[in-house]
Image (cartoon, rainbow, N blue to C red):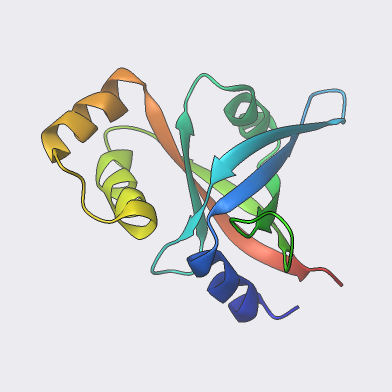
Amino acid sequence: MDLDRARSFVRDNHRAVLGTLRSDGTPQLSPVLVAVDDAGRLVVSTRAATAKVRNLRREPRAWVCVLPDGFFGEWIQVDGSVEIVELPAALPLLEDYYRRIAGEHDDWDDYRRSMRDEQRVLLRIEPTRAGPG
């Protein structure tokens, strides 16, 4: 599958399962919401203390299976290398991520406070392959 077609699919479908590798080489899977930034990277918000972030610090590769809201139907998988963006640099990126998925927030100050309290990071996934296929 063409990477631009995959990005287009992700712009319209945000529910996904993110796969990372545990230290023993087995997959660790997490349900996430995913968007596409202006550079064409897939982006995911998560807490810094999660297993997926621990795994990505060791092995910065991820696999994302993106599904439609109704679960059944067309789906895609995107493989890629991952960059972890930490606070405070992540804060404007997390705001952009939120807008891409949900639109404007009712209280941006509260959102920023929550992102800091939860120690959020932004995962940026540079797509290298998409499928099925």
Residue 107 location (% of width, % of height): 13, 38
Residue 3 location (% of width, % of height): 65, 75
Name which residue lies at 54% across and 75% down: 8
Of residues 59 and 33, the one nearer the viewer is 33
Where residue 75 sits, quadrant-wise, is bottom right
Name which residue lies at 64% across and 53% down: 81
Of residues 96 and 22, the one nearer the viewer is 96
Q: Is residue 84 left or right of residue 53?
A: left
Q: Quadrant of the C terminus?
A: bottom right
Where residue 127 sits, quadrant-wise, is bottom right
Where residue 56 sits, quadrant-wise, is top right
The image shows residue 70, relative to residue 108, as above or below, that is below
Residue 22 location (% of width, % of height): 78, 27
Total numbered labels? 0
Name which residue lies at 56% across and 65% down: 10
Of residues 13 and 54, the one nearer the viewer is 13
Name which residue lies at 42% across and 34% down: 121
Residue 6 location (% of width, % of height): 64, 72
Q: Is residue 3 left or right of residue 86?
A: right
